[in-house]
Structures are given as structure tokens and as C-alpha cells.
Image: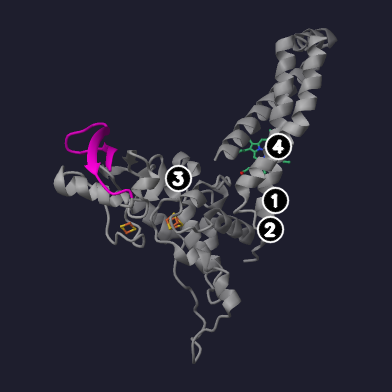
Amino acid sequence: MKVELFIRRFNPETDTKSRMVRYEVEVEPTDRLLDALNAIKWYQDGTLTFRKSCAHGICGSDAMLINGVNRLACKVLIKDLGDRITVEPLRGFRVIKDLVVDMEPFFAAYRSVKPYLINDEPAPRTERRQSPEERERFDDTTKCILCAACTTSCPSFWANEDYIGPAAIVNAHRFLFDSRDRGAAERVDILNSKFGVWRCRTIFNCADACPRGIEVTRAIQDVKRFLLNARI
Amino acid sequence: MWAWILHRVTGVGVMIFIVIHILDTWLIGFGPEVYDTVMNIYRHPIFRLGEVALVGALLFHALNGLRVILIDFWPEAGLFQKQRQLFQVVVVLFFILYVPVAGYMIWDIIY
Ligand code: HEM
Ligand code: SF4
Ligand code: FES
């Protein structure tokens, strides 16, 4: 089938403003949007710039605004998008070129919550044991691929780019609720700060956007309740 | 997202009303004449329609506020996946409560 793609393009060397460019490609309904983008880049216009790597929804590099919602280009099928498709860069970050945005602030927010296991207690002779129930507590938030679909769909983040955003909170949740972790005290300052969890207004855009089906809003509320009850 | 947009619009709307209301009540300090003149303006049908809107805004805000509180503080109920249905419940409840009240208020303006 033939589809029309309207892609928001921006070349920092020649453009002052982004512009929509129309392309026509021949694709199968069961192709992914990424296949259509590749068809343009490989056979029509090699200057079209976008990130992709795994092409299987696991590296998190090709989240973009597709028909007005954040999706992974490698995961969404043409047949679910119709024959007039708009593709734009994620909102809220500086556009470097075309669909490529500057993700550095996103990873800075991610690093700020110390997304790694913190435990200074002497290591036991064997492994640090965890029951299936304890593992289940944070199972959902282990699935994050850091694609930024959630953070860049959030009106609170659009309004204030210093808000650490849903993705950073999801990854804080991953360790806060890990029974082996002892780092809560080191994370609460940023999570409880004015750029932390309290900027969340329970809007649910993040949960709707997450390509991994993580209940992002639930994770954020878990952290809010954790901070309310914390005795640290 | 629409639930939140409506919640903010109604929240800010009600807040603006309260500020105006505090100011007009404060006018009583200038004597009953001043106060009554201003209160007479409120009897104008435009303002009375505004009151109908105010009741609606407050009602929606309160109902959706309860929705958010339930979702946040009752995680065991798993309302996160059902937030859309819960919003539909809010909308239905809103109309059940608001239609008779608004109907009565408008009837009162006309007759
Ligand atoms: C009567 C005067 C009221 C005013 C002026 C008011 C105003 C506001 C405003 C401006 C917000 C911020 C919205 C946002 O950040 O998006 C808000 C949030 C909220 N209000 Fe109200 N409100 C009032 C009454 C109520 C009532 C009666 C309830 C519940 C029974 C309620 C529950 C809430 C909740 C739960 C939020 C947080 C929503 C969220 O962050 O997701 N409010 N209110
Ligand atoms: S929580 Fe979901 S949407 Fe957000 S960065 Fe992780 S995988 Fe992407
Ligand atoms: S290319 Fe890796 S997630 Fe899409």
C-alpha cells in the first residue's frame, strides 16, 4: 500500500524553523513505521536523520511523536496508523537534527536518582536472597528501556524542564522497592525536591505512552506514598 | 489528560471566584450602601448564569478530585488501569447531580 508521511524536519545548518516535509512510500500494512522511515532514508532522501538501533523495541532509541502520540517507530505498525502519518521529534528536548533530540538532560535526570543498587553492608557468604514476593514488588519498573516516551509526553515536564520526569522516577522506584537496596536516604532529597515527584499531577500521559506497558503513574504514586510514610 | 485539563480549568476558575468573593465581602467595610450596590450587580442574569457555571465547576472538580484521591491512596484497588472508566463514572455522576440543580437554578432565573 502507498502511504503519505509528513515528517517534521530541521537542519541546524540551514533552517531557523522546522518544516513539515511530505514523502510517499510503498509499504506493507504489517510493516513497522521504522521500515517506512528506512525506505525514505535508503531510497529517497539520505539526509533524513533519526535514531534507531535494535529495531525490536528494546534499545529505546527510536521513540518519536507519531500521529500526535509518543511511540517507538520500530514497534508501531503501519496498519494501525492509517495512510497519512505524521512523524515529529519528541517534545521538550532541543532538536539536534530532524527526529534526533538532545537526550542529555534526560540522562542527567536519570543519573540524579542513583539508579543502581546501594548497599554498604558486608556482603553475605552467598547471594543476597530475595523472595518471589519481594522481587514482584518492583518487577514492573525493571522493564524500562529509557526511551523517554513517558517524560516527553508529560505536561508537567513541558512546563518545567527541570522536573526529573516519569522515567527517572520509574528507575528510582526500581531500587527504592528492592529489598536488597539501602540507598533510599540518598535518593529522597531529589525525589522530594521541588523538581521531584510532587510535580506529577496524575495526568496519565506517561502510562499511555510507555511502549513497555509499565504502569508509570502507579510507580510515581508508589514513590509519593513512600515519601509520605518514609522515616529517614 | 482531559480529566486533568478540566480539573485545572475548574480549579483555577473556582479560585478566581473565591478571590472575587473575598473582595466583595470586604466591601462591607465601606458601609451597607456600597455593599448593596455591588450585590445588586450580581442579580443580573449574566451573573446568575455565572453561578450556574460555578456550581458545575465546583461539582466536577470535587468529583474528579475524589477520583484522583481514590487512585492515589487506594493502590490495592488497582484503579490505575481503570482510570478511564473511573473518569466516565465521574462524568455520569456529574450529570446526574448537575442537571437537576442547574435546571432548578435556570428556572429560578427565568421565572
Ligand atoms: C473549593 C475550592 C477549590 C479550589 C479553588 C481548588 C483548586 C485547585 C487547583 C487550582 C488545583 C491544581 C490543579 C492542577 O495542578 O492541575 C487543584 C487540585 C486538586 N484539587 Fe482542588 N480545588 C478546590 C476544591 C477541591 C475539592 C472540594 C476537592 C476534592 C474533594 C479538590 C481536590 C483536588 C485534588 C485531589 C487536586 C490534585 C489534582 C492532581 O494533582 O492531580 N479540590 N484544586
Ligand atoms: S517508563 Fe516506559 S516510556 Fe518511560 S522511559 Fe521507560 S520504557 Fe520509555
Ligand atoms: S530501534 Fe531499539 S527500540 Fe526501536
Residue highlighted by disc 3: A153
The quarter in which the C terminus of chain B is drawn is top right
Q: CA distance from mark 3 to mark 2?
A: 26 Å
Q: What amino acid type should be assigned to the residue bearing mark 1?
A: Leu
Residue highlighted by disc 1: B70
From the viewer's perspective, tell me whether residue A164 is left or right of residue A72: right
> Are the residues under badges 4 and 3 in a single subunit?
no
Camera-side residue of A24 and B103:
A24
Residue A59, compared with residue A85, is above or below; it is below
| Start-end of magenta stretch | A1-29
Q: Magenta stretch containing residue A17, yes or no?
A: yes
Task: Chain letter for mark 4, please.
Answer: B
Task: Chain letter for mark 2, please.
Answer: B
Q: Residues within 10 Å of mark 1 (few under 14, many from 20)?
A: some
Residue highlighted by disc 4: B92
Task: Please tell me which residue is depicted at 56% across the width and 56% down the height of the picture.
Answer: A220
Dot in front, 1 or 4: 4
Q: Earlier in the sequence, mark 1 or mark 2?
A: 1
Q: CA distance from mark 4 to mark 2?
A: 21 Å
Contact? badges 1 and 3 (CB < 8 Å): no
Element marked by disc 4: helix
Element marked by disc 1: helix
